[in-house]
Amino acid sequence: MPVSKYRQPLPQNCKISFPQFASYGIAMEHLIQKGLGMTYVMPPRMTRHTLELGARYAPDSVCAPFKLNLGCFLECIDEGADTLIQTGGTCRLGYYGELHEQILRDMGKDVRFVNFAECDFSHPKTFVDEFRELKPDLDLKRFSAAAVETVRMVNAIDEVDALFRRRIGFAEDPKAMEAIRTNWLRQLRLADGIKQIELLRKATVRLLESQKVNMPKHPIRVGVVGEFFTVMDPFSNHDIEYELAHMGVLVDRWMDMSNCMYHYRSRKMLPRIKEYAHYNMGATAMATIDAALHYAKSGFDGIIHVKSAGCTPEIDAIPALQNISADYHVPILYLSFDTQTSETGLNTRLEAFYDMISMRKQAHK
Amino acid sequence: MRIGIPRALYYYRYGALWKTFFSSLGCEVVVSPKTDRAILQSGIHYAIDESCLSAKIYLGHVAWLLGKCDLIFVPRMADMGRDKEFCLKFRALPDVVYNTFRTENVRLVTCDIAVRSGDSEMKAFAELGKKLGFKKQQVFNAYLLAKQAEQQAQAENTRKLEAALAKDDLKVLVSGHAYNIYDDYIGRPVMDAIRANHALPIPSDWVDRDSAWQSGGELTDTMPWMVNRELAGAAVQLRGKVDGIVLLSSFSCGPDSMTDEIMNRRLKNIPILTMTLDGQDGTAGMETRIESFVDILHLRKDGTVCL
């Protein structure tokens, strides 16, 4: 019997939580607290424990984000959350919610579960229905205002992150730069209204730009591409962007929430990548190929492909990436992350990749 | 014109449709032979390591067809409607084949079935016929005949199911993708092992697809994949009529990693064996597991043990 059949009515003041994903929890918190006027339980920072907890109760061969989300849910329940939200998606993500709910039920967890996979993308009203399930007397005006702010917040987070990514590797005082970013995220949580978000963003951008950087004339440039969750979530990818930056690499990543929202369109992308793909492969594979081709054409020194182990769409993008690598003579490092990935093994591969591309750059001078 | 069709993946689901379509148009159809060790090995050679076993086998069949036909038929299949999606593998298949065999100058003919974006199966086949240079009427004649052949194949399966259910034998529902169950190298040994232990294996695709898909909704709300929904529905329909269920998956199958779990958690009061085919040589491990599972089913049926 489908789980949703035995849903209980909603308690008046429920504590809502959503799995942690990069820094976007701040935006989710804003949407829930301001839009619905309900309490949001910010998921605790993901740790080894989160992963192990999720892996213990999840099926073996499911992708790592499923396990991380499950671990996160369990930690949120311990923090007092009684209502959990899961999204839908075109890949396995589309079935996350129902299986998460079933596993939590079988564990005896008495929580409410709101699954956005029940929504139909061609009928936006179904999304509002889902939020109505969270709050039957939903004030649509208030909610849409908060939704607009949430989107702006996401854009601001992405903009600051992109700037941070480009500069941190060459900063004279990286600690100070990190402090600026930490403070930005802390203040953003308190922001109320688009004006405040914008003022904070502008101030942070100015602060980051005022930090001294020693950028060489021709820095080593690496483009990071790959699967939606793992490539954006620093805990999932062992913060490889940070590791690369500390080697003195200029890191670029197209994939973020804002670009997915505004620029992920088959009509635009497929003509650009027609040598390598004729169809949208689903999930973020098309963006992976598009971004990789862009990096290859722009003369990047290397590309890193990041995915969770077994991610079907990204696996299917690999043959195209291999051809891009051959055609443009650009090395690509393929990284799969699962629950077993060891820090040492990963760092060795990153170092070897760095050595190789820097030697190549020397030789090509 | 010689059209090559790899005997893998949805050949086992849509083979009758495809073959009839092309041969009605007067094309010569070359189907690759049954999977053997050499085909599997060549598939493993060409495929990305992390691909699922079934996709590796597919590439092995494509490799076999190289140079033996003018065009290889590799359809792109996204979905047949809401909650009727195919695994994302089938959206990428033409591009995967093209990129993998680029240096071999592979020539593909493809069609795009994506009902939710407005490309119905009929439209896809109309375009396919156009690409091959046939007249519209010819193409529709062929499509109509092909659909008829597909229905006959389904009716044949329904008859087989009725005949099997009428028997007194111990019955085991083998729930898995047709391309795994019917594959000569990975699936057939499992079916043989079940038979060798005096039980009757019933492949889940013997249950009528549409009715199975409907019944799938009784077990799961949001399952997006059409075929996995049918598997769930077949299990729902047959759970009172068979003695046990074998969930048969190929290694690192994406959808099965989740749907096997949900079936295990929700199908109560029936013994379930979850088995993953990894394409390794040697069937002793598999045979032992099947033997002990079927033994338990026999004892359970005789009333010797209670489970």
Image (spheres, rainbow, N blue to C red):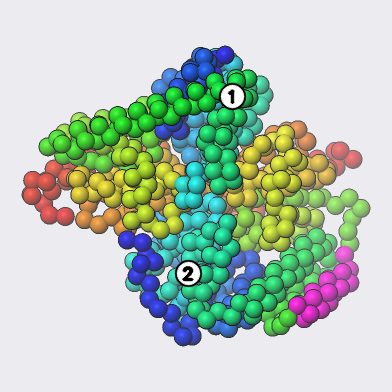
Q: Secondary structure at mark 1?
A: helix
Name the disc covering residue B136, or none: 1
B244 or A161, which is in the foreground? B244
Q: Does the rendering let one see residue A24?
A: yes
Residue A165 location in percent, x, y?
Answer: 77, 62
| Above or below, A314 relative to A117 | above
Residue plotted at (34% across, 45% down) = B212
Q: Quadrant of residue A29?
A: bottom right
Q: Quadrant of residue A257?
A: bottom right
Residue plotted at (83% across, 66% down) = A171
Q: Are marks 1 and 2 in contact (CB under 8 Å)?
A: no
Q: Quadrant of the N terminus of chain A?
A: bottom left
Examine the structure image and report whether residue A65 is included in the region drawn in magenta: no
Residue A201 location in percent, x, y?
Answer: 79, 74
Chain label for disc 2? A
Q: Amino acid at mark 1?
A: Lys
| Above or below, B219 relative to A14 | above
In the image, taking residue A243 as reference, residue B37 lies left or right, namely left
| Above or below, B109 relative to B218 | above
In the image, taking residue A104 as reference, residue A156 lies left or right, namely right
Q: Could you give the CA–CA distance between mark 1 and mark 2, rounded to whole angstroms?
A: 48 Å
Binning the other alpha carbons within 10 Å of mark 2 as few (below 14), some (14 to 19) or many (20 upward) gives many
Residue A161 location in percent, x, y?
Answer: 75, 65
Which residue is label 2 attached to?
A114
Please provide the residue range marked out in magenta: A194-213
Residue B120 location in percent, x, y?
Answer: 54, 39
In the image, taking residue A69 as reference, residue A177 lies left or right, namely right
| Above or below, B247 relative to A248 | above
Residue plotted at (46% across, 36% down) = B53
